[in-house]
Structure formats: C-alpha cells, structure tokens
Amino acid sequence: MDLLRDLLDKQVVDRKQVKIGKVDGLVAELRPDKPPRIVAIELGAITLARRLGARPGRWMAWLAARLGGERHAEPHRIAWKKVRDIDVDIKVDIDVRRTAIFDWQDWLRDHVIGRIPGA
Amino acid sequence: MKKLVEISLGIVTSVGGFLEVGSMATAAQAGATFGFRLIWAILLGTICIIFLVEMAGRFASVSGHTIVDAIRERFGFNAFLWPLFATLLVNFMVMSAEIGGVAIAAEFATGIGFQWWALPVAFLTWLLLWKGTFGFIEKGVAILGLVTLCFVVAAVMLKPDWKAVAAGAIPSLPEHDGANYWFMAVSILGASISPYLFTFYSSGAIEDHWNKTYLGTNRAIAGLGMTFGGTISVGVLIVAALVLGAHGINQVNDYHQLPLLLIPTFGFWGFVLFIASLAIACFGAALEIGLQQAYLVAQGFGWTWGEDLKPREDPAFCGIYTLSLLLAAIPITLGLDPLKLTIFSMAVTAASLPLTVVPFLFLLNDERYVGEHRNGMISNAAVIFIIALGFVLAVVTIPLQIFGGS
C-alpha cells in the first residue's frame, strides 16, 4: 500500500456510517532496525494547519486550546487497530459521539442551528 | 420507462442549472452590441460544458466520489486549498449576482428598489434549502424553469434571418470595439462553463445514488440538457439582437432595458414572462450555488453532508449555506449594480477555470477511480482544449476587463 496515495486525505466514516472527517495526517512509530509502523491516523484542524507549516500549526494549536480547552490542544487520533476497511471510505470502529472530534459541530447545533425553527 | 422519466427530468434540471443571470445578461449584451456574431461563443461554451458535466457524472457514478472529494484525496490538502478558495470566491460573486437578478425581477414587478429585495430573496432561498429535500429543490426549480423557453419561442416568432444566425456560429473578427467583443466572448464562455455546474452535478449524482448503470442516463442528460440550455441562451441572444437593435439600443448597460426583450412578441405578457424567467432562473441558480458552497467545504473537510438530512444532523453543512447566502446578499443590499457584478463575475469565472478543470485530466484517467470507464481520446482532447482555453482566458481577462468592460 502507498500510504500517501491510498490513505492520506481519504474520507473517514465511523461505525454508524457518519462522515467524521478526512485522514488529515498519519502517525508512524520509528522502531530500531525495523521499518516504521503506522500507529494512528490524525484528524482535525491542528493536523491540517501543520501540513501548511510549523507556524500555522502552532497558531492553530493555540487557537484550538483557547476555544476548546485541554481536550482540543492536540490533534484527534484514531488508533490504527481501529481501522476496519479501506475502500472508497475508510471505516473505523469507533463511535464519533464518544470522541471530541465533533465537539464543535455539537456546539454549532446546540447554540446556533438547533435554535432556528425547523431544524 | 423509468429511465426515460429520469432522463427527461435530468434534462429539465440541467436547463435550470445552465440558464442563470450570467447566461441571460451576457447573451443579451452580446446580441444588442454585436448582433448574431457571438453565437459561436455560446456554442463553444455549451460543447465544453457538455464534456465536463458528462465527465463529472461518469466519475461520480463509477467511483462513488464527488469531484471535490476526489480533488482533495488525489492532490492532497495543500493543493486542494487553491481550487477551494478560488471556487468559494467565484461562487460568492456569482451567488450575489443571482440574488441581484431575482431582486431586479422583484423591482420590475413591484417598483420597489432592488436593494430592498436582496435580503428577502436570500431568506427565501435559505428557507427552501432549510426545509426542502434535494429532489424537491432539483425538480421544483427545473419544472418552473421551463418558462425560460419563451425566449426560444420569441426568437422563432421574430423570424430572424437564419442564414445570418448560422453565420454567427462561426467565429469572426469584429469590425468595431475589438476589446469589448473579446470581453463579451470571455464573459459568455464564463457564463456557460460554470464550475459550480459540474461540481454540483457530481454531488447530485451521489445524492441521487447513481452507479455504473447510470452511465447512459448521464450521457443523455449531459448532452441533451446542456444543448437545451445553450439553445435558450442563443434564443436570448437572437431576441436581443433583433429587438434591442430595432429600438436603437446597442449597448445594454442597465437592467431596465431588458424587459423590452419580449414585449414586441408577447405584449404585456412579454413583460410578465421576462420577469418570471429572470426571477426563476436566478432563484434556481442561487439555490444551487448555496448548496454548492456547502458541498464544497463539507466534502473538502470530510464532514457529514447531504441536502436530504435534517439541519440538526449536519449542522456544519447547513451553517455554510446559511452564512454564504447572508454574505452574498450584502453587496446587493448596499446597492452594487447587479448587471456590472454579473458581467464581472462571469469573466472571473472564466479566469478560474484552469484550477477546477486541470484535476479532470488526472481524475478521469486514473484507473483507481474510474477503471475501464476512463476518458477516451476525444474526452481527453476536450479537457486539454478547455484547460488551454482556460489559461488563455485567465491571462486575457484582466486586460480585457480594463479595456473592454463596460
């Protein structure tokens, strides 16, 4: 498998088929005398900002921590062992509601969208 | 039978997408100033958009990806940011122009100045997106959009010199106002080859659950639907050339000149038909672009999207179209001239084409996405031609804007 081609930037769906984001980054573990191994995928604004450069990454991490608190100071990680299937989408065996990934969407729903009649 | 119904609906829908304030305004201006001589630009634009729409539909049906989704996946996040921001900006201007188009129609109908209508129009658009489903919006707008056929009827009833019309289908050099002629040609191409059209179409294919069995349907809809839309644009151009010319108007620089178009043919009802056509075509386009802005961001970042979901289920998606519509209403509310904005945004659209069309060359030839259904020689030649055209347009738009824009 070609990691950048077949993994990075693909759609991620959780076990209930909810689209939870893209594979924004990959986390590899360096092992002595063995090839590196992928241990997790990363999602979220901090990872994306880091791809643009070190400085945008630091700014985004600061901003995320300011807005979302300690829970959001680091990128969201999903362990590699949770990955179930790699096809059109990447299916992971987690429930997005039990993670912090959609905290901001929940906030948007509870404070803005949900308050508009008919939502 | 079911396929036949689907195809006819699809054709009608693509007319709704094709004909909007840009194609109406540019065709009317071109007709008034240069007679039938710019018909070739509409034909060229229509052929290009047929190819792109067919490819977008084929890509989505076979790969299960929308174009936006695949651009991010294939080229990576950093490269994706360029088409993302360019398209968001162009869509913002075009959406503002569409809102302006509906607002102008409302001004004609009521006599109340257009800037007062921008926010109500944006609100009505938003309300339909908020409450409606994808099918409802797609089909409703499509069927109402048939009213624009009145331009084709009028064009035929005015008995144009068909030989001159046919001669206009072949590009020729202008005798006067060279810069203005080319600026018009660029604006017409921008109005016909709208990126929102094919990116929207690929999202629509996913929303309607297309798969490989839809390839024939897709081809028929792309070919016939866009031809149908192009025919109506040519109708507008012919009517403008005959009617406005006869009234001594050879420069359309104000929307108030336009209701005249249908009056010689249909009398008072011509006035009503014009208002209805303008309002419906622009309203339909505003709906589609509103959705398109939301698709663009949600698909680019991998969030839940879908017009058939309730706003609670995809708050970010709904938040984007809500914000886009609100922002797009602002320039019109502040009194920016909708006609100037329209012509300008069509030229900018043309200039942004390379960013959205270059990915087609890669995506439609990538076997991992489209397998055996990848582009043949002709489709690839068409894409390369459109990219080349796009680059030329991108380079000439700004100088032409300065020297040829009215």
Image: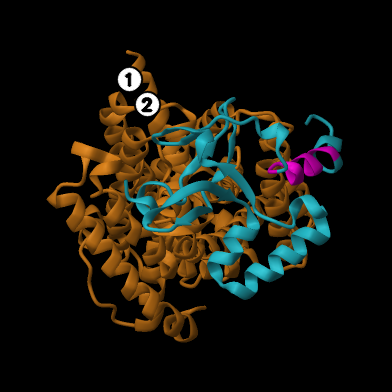
Chain colours: A cyan, B orange
User: Is residue A104 visible in the rendered structure shown here?
Assistant: yes
Which residue lies most toward the top here? B1
- Main SS category, magenta section: helix
- Mark 1: secondary structure: helix
What residue lies at 18% left-to-right and 37% top-to-bottom? B372
- Tell whether B304 sits left or right of B124: left
What residue lies at 75% left-to-right and 46% top-to-bottom? A104
Looking at the rendered structure, the kind of residue marked 1 is: Leu
Q: Is A11 or B381 nearer to us in this picture?
A: A11
Provide the residue designation for mark 1: B4
> Which quadrant holds residue B130?
top right
> Does A104 appear in magenta?
yes
Q: Is A84 or B293 nearer to us in this picture?
A: A84
User: Is residue B150 visible in the rendered structure shown here?
Assistant: no
Residue A75, position as x, y percentages in the image? 65, 54
Count of marks, rendered view: 2
Q: Quadrant of the N terminus of chain B?
A: top left
For residue B8, the mark is 2
- Mark 2: secondary structure: helix
Please provide the residue range marked out in magenta. A101-110
The residue carrying pointer 1 sits among few (fewer than 14), some (14 to 19) or many (20 or more) residues within 10 Å by Cα, namely few
> Does B308 appear in magenta?
no
As drawn, B348 above or below A41? below
- Tell whether B358 sits left or right of B240: left
Q: Is B398 or B144 nearer to us in this picture?
A: B398
Looking at the rendered structure, the kind of residue marked 2 is: Ser
Chain of the residue on which disc 2 is drawn: B
Q: Is B72 or B118 nearer to us in this picture?
A: B72
Residue B204, position as x, y percentages in the image? 47, 36
What residue lies at 49% left-to-right and 42% top-to-bottom? A11
Which residue lies most toward the front here? A33
> Which quadrant holds residue B13?
top left
